[in-house]
Image (cartoon, rainbow, N blue to C red):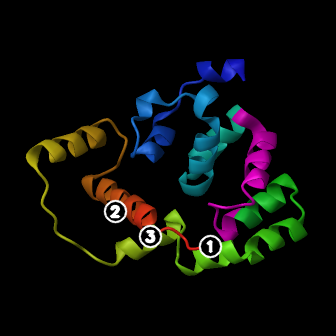
Amino acid sequence: MAGRSANPIPPPVRKLFWDLDPRSLRLDRDEEMIIGRVLASGPWETVKWLRSIVGDDAIRQWIEEHDGRGLSPRQLRYWQLVLGIPAGVVDAWLRSDRRRVWDRRGGTAAASTRRMRGAKVAISLAPEDLKQVDQLVEEGMFPSRSKFIQEAVIEKLERLLPVQP
């Protein structure tokens, strides 16, 4: 892992960490968090980057250590095929009680994003907060103000409404 700290985190991956200071991310220290966020929320270009940097063994290890949590059933089936994870193992993860509760509430980031597309909401922000949002958009961390706000709302909802065991 010594060589991994020298690998810079590319902008498309940094965008996934809107809730942190992405400049503080280090692959050697934050590998588990980076793998999880890229697998759960990253576009294809970030997944390709992740595979080239950490490799499929590290991705498989992460998925197995987390019993597939954080990934949608579709994402899990994809990695089942790509990484050769036995179907019975993935089936068991998807049948678990904790998993079913999470899936029913639409707890994946992709499902939450789909819910957000249908409604428009007007909000007011303090000028200094809007300036910070605009700075993140200018730095390419978010494509727009709207995307930043959508992701912030989703993140807050997921923290406030935890899954009941």
Q: Which residue in the protein does label 1 denote?
A: 165
Q: Quadrant of residue 150?
A: bottom left
Dots 2, 1 in contact, CB < 8 A: no
Secondary structure of residue under mark 3: loop
Instruction: Judge from the rendering whether residue 127 lies leftward or rightward of residue 35; answer left or right.
Output: left
63 inside magenta stretch: yes
Tell me the mark number nearer the camera, choosing from 2 and 1: 1
**Residue 67 to residue 1: above or below:** below
**Alpha carbon separation for disc pair 3 and 2:** 12 Å
Residue farthest to the front, as pictured? 165
> Nearest the camera: 151 or 78?
151
> Nearest the camera: 110 or 26?
26
Q: Position of residue 55 (x, y in %)?
A: 76, 37
Q: Which quarter of the figure is the N terminus placed in?
A: top right
Q: Amino acid at mark 1?
A: Pro
Rendered residue at 72%/64% (across/down): 76
Q: Which residue in the protein does label 3 denote?
A: 161
Q: Position of residue 142 (x, y in %)?
A: 35, 47
Q: Which quarter of the figure is the C terminus placed in?
A: bottom right
Q: Which residue in the protein does label 2 denote?
A: 153
Tell me the mark number nearer the camera, choosing from 3 and 2: 3
Residue farthest to the left, as pictured? 127
Magenta stretch bounds: 54-75
Rendered residue at 54%/67% (across/down): 108
Q: Residues within 10 Å of mark 1 (few under 14, many from 20)?
A: few
**Alpha carbon separation for disc pair 2 and 1:** 23 Å
Secondary structure of residue under mark 1: loop
Q: Amino acid at mark 3?
A: Leu
- Mark 3 / mark 2, whichever is N-terminal: 2
